Amino acid sequence: MRADSVDTVLYLAHTQSEGALSKGALEALTAARELTAQLGHAELVAAIVGGDIQHAADSIADCGASKFLGVSGEAFAQSRYVTDAAAIEAICRAAQPAIVICGSSSRFNRVLPGVASRLGGCADLHATEMKVDAGNVFVTRWYYRQRIRAALTRDKRPWFVALEAGSYAPHSSAGGSAAVESVPVSLPEPGLRTNVEGLQKPAGQTQTIRPDANLLFVAGAGWTKKQADGEAHIQDAETIILEFLGKSQASLGGSKSLVDISGTGQAVLSFMTHLNQIGQTGAIPRHPRGLSTCCHGEEPHAVGWRFISERRAINLDANCGWAHGKADVLYVADAFEVMRKVNALLGNQ
Ligand SMILES: Cc1cc2nc3c(=O)[nH]c(=O)nc-3n(C[C@H](O)[C@H](O)[C@H](O)COP(=O)(O)OP(=O)(O)OC[C@H]3O[C@@H](n4cnc5c(N)ncnc54)[C@H](O)[C@@H]3O)c2cc1C
């Protein structure tokens, strides 16, 4: 579709449990503002779904939206397909957007394709960029586990785009007072069949996954291997890594080898689960910095590092994968020694 036929860009967000917008949602707002500006004559409309949305709307009151739409109330406080789909459908019918931009979240990702289908539109999830080129709107996303990057455009409208966290700078705002127009939603009869009773956390003893951390610390299987004295030092490894995570507030990643060893019940890092795994078959983190330790840096592992801006590694092996262009800096050193020293330098933070 030509840019000149686009009139409304709808920014869509849901509140977090405490009523605020997530960092990813604020990043999507930056994308929506930038796209609206690139389109020139387009109008930005903001819409929020949640239990109580006024605080969230006020926090972005000065974002440049011509109006704020909202669906709120107890039924919309929790993530549930039927209520979320009905809310977004009602918002879209009210706003008649050409393009809908939101941050990727499990809550929105599962509902957007269904809503797009109801409205005769289309949806692209896991996008990393939106821009206008030669009058057309393009969405960029990665395929084949971050190996191929494609820019695509679509004719169908409304076009829903969910942006991956870490792709844009979060919108920062002084806040203000937003006048939210409430959008009526009709829920299906005879009522709601699904209720969220609680949240279950991953099986690790310690919460180690911090998506918003400045640094990703990756532990490889080397932490569990026999060291120069012929012994494995798993207890030391645990202490060193946990101390570093506590002081730096870094997020913890693991290589496939390491998390697989955990799965076989061998004595390994007790806080490491499969949810920590980074790489081709693991998570694709988007932290500004990454430090890989005792991990060889083979391609399936390093492919998940595409979105880490500054990559460093510590390995005893000067010929490890990181030395072959996969890291900006490689320290050929004993990670036990280096991280003990780093912990000492960090002091009592
Ligand atoms: C299809 C496919 C998909 C895969 N997907 C993934 C994936 O998503 N993620 C992933 O991680 N892997 C993946 N793998 C596996 C990957 O190829 C590697 O086998 C794995 O990542 C290796 O883990 P590692 O580097 O921790 O362990 P190892 O290969 O055992 O390396 C341990 C490293 O620790 C170093 N070391 C030991 N002691 C010290 C010390 N004291 N100080 C410093 N360094 C030390 C050693 O020099 C060595 O380089 C995949 C493989 C395949 C075939």
Image (spheres, rainbow, N blue to C red):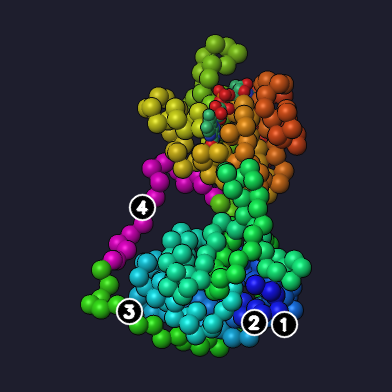
Mark 2 nearby-residue class (10 Å; few <14, some 14–19, many ≥20): some
> Callout 3 environment at 10 Å: few (<14), some (14 to 19), or many (20+)?
some
The residue singled out by tag 1 in the image is 41
Residue 169 at what x, y percent from top left?
A: 68, 62
Question: What's the amino acid at mark 3?
Answer: Leu
The boundaries of the magenta stretch are 194-210
Q: Earlier in the sequence, mark 4 or mark 1?
A: 1
Q: Residue at x 56, y 39 (%)?
A: 279
Rounded to the nearest angstrom, the CA distance separating label 4 from label 1 is: 46 Å
Q: Spatial distance from mark 4 to mark 3, Cα to Cα? A: 28 Å
In this view of the protein, which residue sits in the foreground, 244 or 317? 317
Tag on residue 187?
A: 3
Pick whichever, 331 or 343, lies toward us. 331
Q: Position of residue 76 (x, y in %)?
A: 39, 74
Q: Is residue 221 visible?
A: yes
Asked where in the image residue 6 lies, by quadrant, the reply is: bottom right
Q: Nearer the viewer, mark 4 or mark 2?
A: 2
Q: Earlier in the sequence, mark 3 or mark 2?
A: 2
| Label of residue 200 in the image | 4
Tag 2 and tag 1, C-beta contact below 8 Å? yes
Which residue is rendered at x = 51% and y = 23% of the image?
Answer: 224
Where residue 232 sits in the image (x, y, percent)? 51, 18
Q: Residues within 10 Å of mark 1 (few under 14, many from 20)?
A: some
Crowding near the residue tagged with mark 4, few <14, some 14–19, many ≥20 C-alpha atoms within 10 Å: few
